[in-house]
Amino acid sequence: MPFVPPPYDPVRLARVAAMFEERPRPLNALQRKRIASGLSQDELAEAVGVSRQTISSIENRRTTPSVQLALAIAAELGARVEELFPRDEPGSDAS
């Protein structure tokens, strides 16, 4: 029996397409400082001894760095921890 595609549904297609759209998100302080320093996620990760995925997760607020890692990142970028991880940044859990 040959494959028969489901009927064309423009509304469903638009919803699925929207899920995969690239939506620009504002850069957080860590991303801004890393980019201004001319470092890629890979380069920063190597410098502080973690994976690129760890840096990505921190930048995308999926994980919070340990104090030791936050200090290492700040030292590598020539910044203060408070600059890179402000408590009042959108998406933070601080009240």
Image (cartoon, helix red, strand yellow):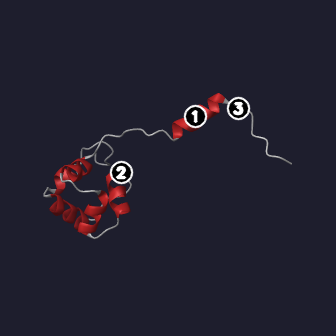
Identity of the amino acid at label 2? Answer: Asn
Please provide percent x and percent y for residue 62: 39, 54
Residue under numbered circle 1: 15
Q: Earlier in the sequence, mark 2 or mark 3?
A: 3
Picture residue at 27% right of the left edge, 46% below the top: 28
Please provide percent x and percent y for residue 94: 28, 48
Residue at disc 1, secondary structure: helix
Numbered tag placed on residue 60 in the rendering: 2
**Residue furthest top in the image:** 10
**CA–CA distance in space, label 2 to label 3:** 36 Å
Which of the two residues, 67 or 12, is positioned nearer the viewer here? Answer: 12
**CA–CA distance in space, label 2 to label 1:** 24 Å
Q: Nearer the viewer, mark 3 or mark 1?
A: 3
Residue under numbered circle 3: 8
Identity of the amino acid at label 3? Answer: Tyr
Picture residue at 32% right of the left edge, 53% below the top: 59
